[in-house]
Image (cartoon, grey):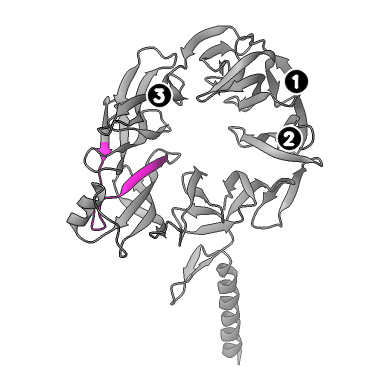
Amino acid sequence: MRLQLYQEAVYILIFVFLVGCSSHITNVTSSAGVRYQRSPDYVIYYSDGTGIFESNTTTIDKLIFRYPSNTRGFQWEVSPDSKKIAFSLVDNDFEETTLSILDLISLKSWQIKKIPKGLHFSFKWSPDSKELAVAYASFTDNKYRLEYRSGVADIFITSSVDSTVKSIGCNVSKSVNHWLTNNILVVGDGNFLYGVNRQNCSTLFSLNMIDKTKITFSPDGTMIFYFTNVPVYKESGGKIDMTELYLANYDGKQPKKIIGYRYDPHHASWSPDGTKIVCDVRSLEWTDVRHIAIYDLVAGKASFSTEENDWGIPISEKPFWSPDGTKLLYDQTYELLYGRSAYETFYDNTYQTGSNSYFVLHKTLRNLLTNQKEVILEGSIHQNNLLTQAVGETVFWIDKQNILFGSAQWYKIYNILTKSVYTFSPDKHPILIKQLSK
């Protein structure tokens, strides 16, 4: 009798243990191939149009800041230490903009400035998260960039510690572009970027922006890359603009073309350690095919990743570095055809798409240390270009394990270690996501 009671107790304990574990299993696949989804180990700060909310696995969504009536959220920027959010609210009647800061630890918020209707504004956090630089000015929006007019304008710095506000008197500069260090701001007037002292806005260097786009500073602030447009005339007589990628010192001096217009580079970004630049480039062999290219600053040259397998030659584009710089995530699109000759005619623009061909779009993760690749999300696009299984756009890496994807139908968080996918509503616009410690 005692043995029977002992066995029953063991069975109950095993049952309770399994039930308890089921709520923490990352993903379970049934015999039918169905993947069951667990509650995620994330805290998500999001806006739904009424305020800023906190969502996690243990409580219902919590409102931490309610927007005043008749206002809408417009722009958010998280501090580098992920403890504060700077955001703007627009009055629906008067189009006046209010800038505020929300402390995610204390949940205290304070207003730092009201900006009248019709003025352009920008704001950037300092690297140490203790200050926010804000600029506003009147402007004319031409085809290529904002051109600032004389009139109402200011650049000021507010403390996120004691909420003090100080104008730094940048008369010639009307926008905040970047912080090089805690003491050096990069500001602009639409035609030039200026490195200035954050105390009095004295100019340390100037950088001509004419004929340059997407000027991007390296993580240590010593270098920049930028694009230039090159008009190319086709045999038919038509003209198209191709891009070239340049590398230069932080002040624009000693420019060096690193990828020419024949490759038409796009979607460039610095590696986290600032030693490499990744982008996608046009194939010189196949029309309309793009490859991933990595320029190594130490070696002084670019390597091109041309890929081909049983599915054919993929279009590889839109690369994203992982936060530790060891992986690249990018889009790969295949046109599923039959036979090498079909691929050749398709990529030479002579193949007529038949009823048996369709596109497949993958999110591909490449380990730069081992050169191994894996598909982490897959979707298909048929001839009529209707998405039958959307994979969405890569929004950003949350950390070295988690990636956020977005579409018109959903947001998805993908964990590359556990292969788990957490999906939430597109109405919840994510501002900041953290994985909870276990």
Q: Which type of secondary structure does the marked residue at label 3 adopt?
A: strand
Residue at point 26% right, 42% down? Answer: 287
- Separation of marks 3 and 2 at Cα, in angstroms: 34 Å
- Separation of marks 1 and 3 at Cα, in angstroms: 35 Å
Q: Which residues are magenta?
A: 304-320
State if disc 2 and disc 3 touch (CB < 8 Å): no
Q: Say which quarter of the image contains residue 153.
A: top right
Residue at point 62% right, 35% down? Answer: 78
Foreground tag (1 vs 3): 3
User: Disc 3 designates what residue?
Assistant: 225
User: Disc 2 designates what residue?
Assistant: 90
Residue 48: where, in percent of width, then height? 69, 48
Q: Residue furthest front?
A: 237
Q: Which type of secondary structure does the marked residue at label 1 adopt?
A: loop
316 within the magenta span? yes
Tell me if mark 3 has few (under 14), some (14-19) or many (20+) residues whose alpha carbon lies within 10 angstroms of its own.
many
Amino acid bearing label 3 = Phe
State if disc 3 and disc 1 touch (CB < 8 Å): no
334 within the magenta span? no
User: Disc 1 designates what residue?
Assistant: 164
Where's the N terminus, which quadrant?
A: bottom right
Foreground tag (1 vs 2): 2
